[in-house]
């Protein structure tokens, strides 16, 4: 009985978080399905890795450029209203895609523009959401909830390629967009009616002049070299990961043995791996060294998946690569989340998370651009010029073999990044410093 009583008490304490988490996770599924479907649509239109990669470049660029300023606004504004307004604006852009599609006028540049608007909204919504989680969540649940949050992301990763491919095949792109709008409505109503987000704790940001408020987070980070170094580590990892994301559709959709089904299968396995990893992370006890866990998980991911994607010739090898590359990522993310929440003062979290977004994510549009350009302009022409030889033996022939070569190159880049930052003394100093 004691265990049941404790469980019910925990559910009661987590009620607001669970409603917020479930609604946002459901909405994220719809958004991910639309993004997945638009990647396939754009590659069908142009057959270019760079054209597809620019979808994410257009989304991340305004997000990064405005993140620092958006964090200052986020700390001053009501979190619930901010989230509702930003989500509503994103929903309107989805309606615009649907209207253009049904009028037969949807073009690639329309999606670039719409993604830029979504990036702008996300730059404000994301730090507000992070602060909202901290406000409704008791600190003793940080470790378990860190895994639970990535559990939702894992479910979405598993379901997105399956559901999006099924809806695309049966009913076309409009059905995917309609589903996205349904998920938005459900999430917004649950947030509006059943989630109360305390607004105390942000008074410092409200009293400071705007420009002073923007600079507060930067000044705080100057005194936290461990957190700053950790952010730079993740920025370097994001550079490699975004190059991977740019090349992935090009290889999956054009390589011998690939196609939409193969891409969907590999993405589903990646989702299953992150689901299993998230379950493990949510049940795992706090490790003795969170920094060691973060470094080891990233090194394992970087030293397995990209090499196997490069050298594999069948969907089953690519599926194994995806599983190995993503199984440890939720554990890494959960421990990273705890470090940030414990170290960053609650009153500064919106601003610091916004600066973190700018630092960690500024490499993403660069990575997408370099990934698309590297495949289209460098690696594919190199492989097209091969007439036998070691490169052909390793990576095959025809369209997609250049993407395989590209994966081989970024595998070693990722390993080098992990080994370099593993030696950073400021990051390891986080182990001995308690929250201040």
Image: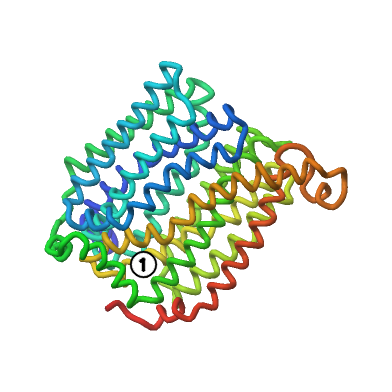
Q: Quadrant of the C terminus?
A: bottom left
**Residue extending farthest right:** 388
Q: Which residue: 60% across, 61% down?
A: 302
Report x, y in % for residue 74.
23, 54
Residue 287, above or below 77: below
Residue neighbourhood size for the residue with mark 1, other residues' Cα within 10 Å, grouped as few (<14), some (14–19), many (≥20): some
Report x, y in % for residue 103.
41, 16
State the residue position of label 1.
338
| Side of 30 relative to 366 (left or right) | left
| Side of 394 relative to 105 (left or right) | right
| In-front residue for pair 71/155 | 71
Q: Quadrant of the N terminus?
A: bottom left
| In-front residue for pair 327/404 | 404
Residue 104, above or below 283: above
How many discs appear?
A: 1
Q: Which residue: 47% across, 58% down?
A: 330
Report x, y in % for residue 28.
38, 42
Q: Quadrant of residue 149?
A: bottom left
Q: Which residue: 59% across, 56% down?
A: 325
Res 151 visible? yes
Report x, y in % for residue 26.
35, 40
**Residue extending farthest front:** 211
Element type at marker 1? helix
Res 30 visible? no
| In-front residue for pair 224/302 | 224
| Side of 387 relative to 199 (left or right) | right
Q: Quadrant of residue 48?
A: top right
Q: Which residue: 47% across, 26% down?
A: 107
Q: Quadrant of residue 131?
A: bottom left
| In-front residue for pair 298/315 | 298
């Amino acid at each position: 009985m004691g265990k049941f009583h404790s469980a019910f008490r925990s559910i009661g304490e987590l009620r607001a978080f669970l409603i917020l988490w479930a609604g946002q996770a459901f909405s994220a599924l719809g958004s991910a399905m639309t993004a997945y479907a638009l990647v396939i649509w754009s590659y069908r239109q142009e057959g270019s890795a760079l054209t597809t990669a620019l979808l994410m470049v257009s989304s991340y660029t305004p997000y990064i450029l405005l993140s620092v300023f958006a964090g200052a606004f986020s700390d001053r504004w009501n979190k619930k209203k901010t989230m509702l307004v930003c989500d509503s604006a994103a929903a309107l852009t989805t309606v615009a895609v649907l209207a253009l599609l049904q009028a037969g006028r949807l073009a690639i540049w329309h999606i670039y523009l719409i993604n830029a608007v979504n990036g702008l909204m996300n730059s404000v919504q994301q730090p507000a959401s992070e602060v909202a989680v901290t406000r409704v969540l008791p600190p003793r649940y940080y470790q378990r909830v860190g895994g639970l949050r990535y559990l939702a992301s894992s479910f979405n990763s598993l379901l997105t390629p399956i559901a999006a491919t099924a809806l695309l095949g049966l009913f076309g792109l409009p059905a995917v967009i309609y589903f996205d709008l349904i998920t938005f409505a459900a999430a917004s109503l649950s947030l509006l009616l059943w989630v109360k987000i305390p607004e105390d704790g942000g008074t410092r940001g409200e009293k400071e002049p705007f420009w002073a408020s923007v600079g507060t987070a930067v000044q705080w980070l100057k005194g936290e070299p461990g957190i700053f170094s950790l952010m730079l580590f993740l920025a370097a990892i994001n550079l490699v990961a975004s190059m991977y994301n740019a090349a992935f559709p090009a290889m999956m959709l054009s390589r011998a043995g690939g196609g939409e089904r193969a891409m969907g299968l590999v993405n589903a396995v990646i989702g299953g791996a992150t689901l299993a990893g998230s379950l493990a992370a949510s049940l795992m006890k706090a490790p003795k060294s969170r920094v060691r866990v973060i470094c080891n998980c990233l090194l394992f991911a970087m030293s397995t998946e990209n090499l196997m994607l490069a050298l594999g010739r069948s969907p089953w090898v690519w599926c194994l690569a995806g599983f190995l590359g993503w199984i440890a990522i939720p554990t890494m993310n959960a421990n990273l989340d705890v470090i940030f929440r414990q170290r960053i003062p609650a009153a500064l979290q919106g601003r610091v998370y916004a600066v973190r977004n700018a630092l960690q994510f500024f490499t993403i549009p660069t990575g997408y651009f370099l990934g698309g350009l590297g495949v289209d302009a460098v690696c594919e022409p190199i492989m097209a010029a091969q007439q036998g030889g070691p490169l052909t033996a390793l990576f095959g022939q025809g369209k997609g073999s250049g993407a395989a070569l590209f994966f081989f190159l970024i595998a070693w880049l990722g390993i080098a990044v992990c080994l370099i930052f593993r030696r950073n003394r400021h990051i390891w100093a986080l182990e001995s410093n308690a929250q201040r």
